[in-house]
Amino acid sequence: MTDGPRTFRQALCTIPDLVAAKAGRTVTVCIPARNEERTIAQVVRTVLDTHGPAPGSGLVDEVLVVDDGSADDTAGRSRSAGARVVSLTGPGGKGRAMAAGLEAATGDLLVYLDGDVENTSEVFVSGMVGPLLLADDVALVKGFYDRPYGDDPQGGGRVTELVARPVIELLFPELAAVRQPLAGETAAHRWVLEKVDFAPDYGVELGLLVDVARRFGASAIAQVDLGVRIHRNRPLSELRPQATQVLRAALDRTGIGPDGS
């Protein structure tokens, strides 16, 4: 066993082999979404068409969209594409939506995907569940990828590069090898997710990494190469609140932040 997170290159075996490896376990794909009517149906259909119980491979048993207070037709388009939709009640936030998805999901394994990705493909699911199904000591899987921004093929992920990765290198160096700590593509066993906390907002991804590493060891985390990820790049004015939330989640887990203990 390695001391830190392990890296895999997409699917570890064929899709039929992954389906056989489920051995009675079930898989839910959960998509937290707010105002993603432009892309959400495509994401849902891609998962169902390639991996759903019908007409897909049978790798995925359920696709669940958590509508995080959308003002557009995210919920309607998700249902039309074949997803089950639950609406987040009370305060919103990505972490709250992910926690609501865990509560509503029926699967033994959960794969979280973002609803704004324009090039979701079958490997976003098969690549993520592979380590969970085939390696008994993997608790959490993250995706990593190139993120284009304009003409720069790797210029995206500004909060990741300017906040998340530096904070991890300084405060949680055992996780420094994780290439996309804020990736929305996250997969885990249900029993793992039930043992950790969900930060309420965009700090949730970093919080899950740190909490899983502390409870199960950094070697229980795997990352999978998903190629290139194309999604909506937000303006800088929207990134500062995200950066603050990520930093707060990190500091809380050192005891420095206002919620630390």
Image (spheres, helix red, strand yellow):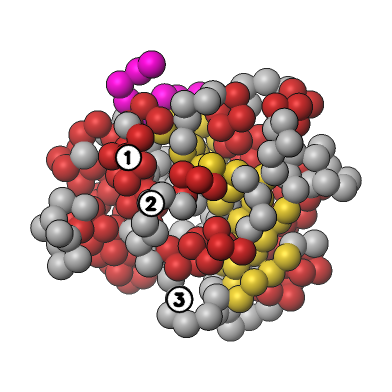
Dividing the picture into quadrants, the one containing residue 210 is top left
Q: In this view, does 35 lie above or below 126?
A: below
Quadrant of the rendering where the N terminus is positioned: top left
Find the residue positioned furthest to the top: 1
Query: Which residue is labeled 3 in the image?
Result: 92
Q: Are marks 2 and 1 in contact (CB under 8 Å)?
A: yes
Q: Position of residue 192 (x, y in %)?
A: 46, 44
Pointer 3 local density, CA inside 10 Å: few below 14, some 14–19, many at least 20: some
Q: Please tell me whether residue 48 belongs to the stretch shown in magenta.
A: no
Q: Position of residue 74 (x, y in %)?
A: 66, 73
> How far separated are the C-alphas under marks 1 and 3?
27 Å
Q: Residue at x 59, y 48 (%)?
A: 110
Type of amino acid at the residue the image marks with label 2: Val
Q: Residue at x 63, y 26 (%)?
A: 11
Q: Is residue 261 above or below residue 188?
A: below
Find the residue positioned furthest to the right: 55
Type of amino acid at the residue the image marks with label 3: Gly
Q: In this view, does 253 lie to the left or right of 78?
A: left
Q: Is residue 195 left or right of residue 229?
A: left
Segment tinted magenta in the rendering: 1-10
Q: Nearer the viewer, residue 220 or 67?
A: 220
Name the secondary structure under disc 1: helix
Q: Which is closer to the viewer, label 1 or label 3?
A: 1
Q: In this view, does 243 lie above or below 163?
A: below
Type of amino acid at the residue the image marks with label 1: Arg
Q: Nearer the viewer, residue 86 or 165?
A: 86
Going from the N terminus, do you reach mark 1 or mark 3 first? 3
Query: Which residue is labeled 1 in the image?
Result: 215
Q: In this view, does 257 lie to the left or right of 137?
A: left
- Which of the labelled discs sits on residue 196, or is there none? 2
